[in-house]
Image (cartoon, grey):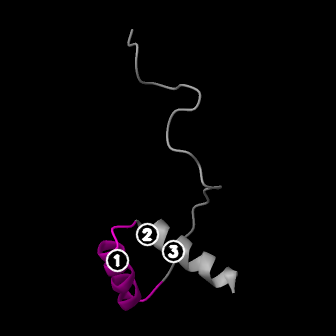
Amino acid sequence: MFSKGGLREGSGRKSIGTTKKISLTLTDDLWERLEKDCTDNNQSRSEVIRKMVESFYAN
């Protein structure tokens, strides 16, 4: 039996909210721009889209 690893209370990445799977249809141009933004800023698609949504609702 291992003394480290596995499920433990408080282990793992902390949640920032509820995860819901969605399907998003964009033009090829918009997908390319989104992917470039992700690469340029070293962020995941989720991070970039989350920031867009937060910015939209902040105004």
- Label 1–label 3 contact, CB within 8 A: no
- Label 2–label 1 contact, CB within 8 A: yes
Between the C-alphas of marks 1 and 3, the distance is 11 Å
For label 3, the SS is helix
Q: Mark 3 — residue?
A: 49
The kind of residue tagged 3 is Ile
Q: Is residue 10 above or below residue 35?
A: above
- Label 3–label 2 contact, CB within 8 A: yes
Q: Which residues are magenta?
A: 26-43
Between the C-alphas of marks 2 and 1, the distance is 7 Å
Pinpoint residue 13: horizontal percent, then vertical percent: 50, 44
Q: Mark 1 — residue?
A: 35
Q: Mark 2 — residue?
A: 45
> Counting other residues with Cα less than 10 Å from the Cα at mark 1, is it few (<14), some (14-19), or many (20 or more)?
some
Q: Considering the image in quadrants, where does the N terminus appear?
A: top left
Write the residue at 30% across / 73% down. 39
Write the residue at 39% across / 81% down. 34
Pinpoint residue 11: horizontal percent, then vertical percent: 52, 32
> Counting other residues with Cα less than 10 Å from the Cα at mark 2, is it few (<14), some (14-19), or many (20 or more)?
some
For label 1, the SS is helix
